[in-house]
Image: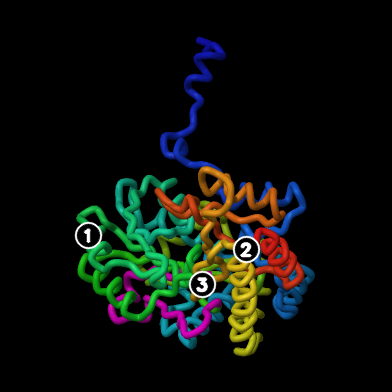
Amino acid sequence: MTLSASALASKLQVSKISEGLAQSEIRAMTVECDNIGGVNLAQGVCDTDVPPAVAAAAVNAIHEGRNIYTRLDGITVLREAIAGKLALQNGILCDPQNGVLITNGATGGMMAAAMALLNPGDEVVLFEPFYGYHRNTLAALGVNRKYVRLHSGTDWSFDPDELRAAINGKTRAILVNSPGNPTGKVFNRAELELIADLAIEHDLFVFTDEIYEYFVYDDARHISLASFPGMAERTITISGFSKTFSITGWRLGYVAASPRWTPAIGYFHDLLYVCAPSPLQYGAAAGLLHLPPIFYQQIAIDHHSKRDRLCSALTDAGLTPSIPAGAYYVLADATKLDGKDAKQKARSLLARTGVGAVAGSAFYENGGDNELRFCFAKKDDALDQACRALRTLA
């Protein structure tokens, strides 16, 4: 029997999970900014220069014919370089043969890890404001979220009792993004010790997104949760090279975890992506192996200056910023801008100044309607142009 067009159409519908999902507001504002030729401080594209050693190694790998699939967990030299870096800089000991996976960006690592270790109906605790990809990855897998609020004006601290109350019999994991997007929150040792204690007490995984680890300012210090006693077995450390080497378009990340979990994570990453781009892995390996310590120190120095310049311009514009301790984003008060909510305020700012920003509401389940997020990982000329444009609001 042939189905009529109307009957067929009634069967072709999006899944129940996808009904609640929408395009990232970050991507939407990037498109709108590009349409008018504005300065895009909406998306963390990190358009600063790629280190020459990283670019040259990737180009050489292409010419040497390293253009076929790699092992699903990535090339050996990169896995060994990551393991060495984690041991030296993060206090994390992992086996490069069984405890490190090269992934298609940190987002690919997060998706594969969540698919491997979480079930629909599980709960994961997120700190709010959150990075939208974290929230939406969990939502896409049918995983429920419980939110613990980070409070502006207090270094984005959280209430320990609120965190304890968010954990129940359905809780499977806590997700920690430090240094964080969009707040720039850098979790201190006492906060991380509390999270570690609760994870051990309730037998939870902890997913850590540490992609901004070198972007720390003032007295802030990045500390990896997997380095705490009892946490190596239950921490899924997720990071990558997009921000450090200014190669966001290369889509190179990694997961470091116990060999108990990496086979399952690797299975799902293989299913989704097969492998990370082969020649680009050689570029990242060259960066880890050959760039001196001063390169990483300079990242913080350069972006500290960029942060201060943008925050000064936002203050002059009447868009009072929350000064971030890390990462390369600023949340600012958008009360003075026209619009009933943050999305309208972002578009009002774009129309008046040509500067693209992201609605703060993109980082809350409910809230952020008087906040905008700005990215300062820009080349100096573009950042200075944005600062001049913002000051016209004064």
Residue type of the residue flagged with mark 2: Ala
In the drawing, does residue 185 fall left or right of residue 282? Answer: left
> Residue at the front extreme?
394
Q: Nearer the viewer, residue 152 or 187?
A: 152
Point out which mark residue 165 bears. 1
Looking at the image, residue 126 lies above or below residue 381: above
Residue at image location 55% in from the left, 66% down from the top: 330
> Residue at the right extreme?
63
Q: Secondary structure at mark 2?
A: loop
Q: Which residue is mark 3?
A: 323
Q: Secondary structure at mark 1?
A: helix
* Residue 252 x/y as whole percent: 60, 66
Q: Which residue is mark 2?
A: 317
N-terminal of the pair, mark 3 or mark 2, is 2
Do tag 3 and tag 2 residues touch (Cβ < 8 Å)?
no
Q: Nearer the viewer, residue 370 or 248?
A: 370
Q: Quadrant of residue 258?
A: bottom left
N-terminal of the pair, mark 2 or mark 1, is 1
Q: Which residues are magenta?
A: 215-239
* Residue 259 x/y as whole percent: 38, 71
Residue 320 magenta? no
Alpha carbon separation for disc pair 2 and 1: 40 Å
Q: Secondary structure at mark 3?
A: loop
Task: Tell me the chief SS of the magenta region.
Answer: loop
Q: Nearer the viewer, mark 3 or mark 2?
A: 2
Residue at image location 53% in from the left, 66% down from the top: 321
Residue type of the residue flagged with mark 3: Ile
Q: Quadrant of residue 289?
A: bottom right
Point out which mark residue 392 bears. none
N-terminal of the pair, mark 3 or mark 1, is 1
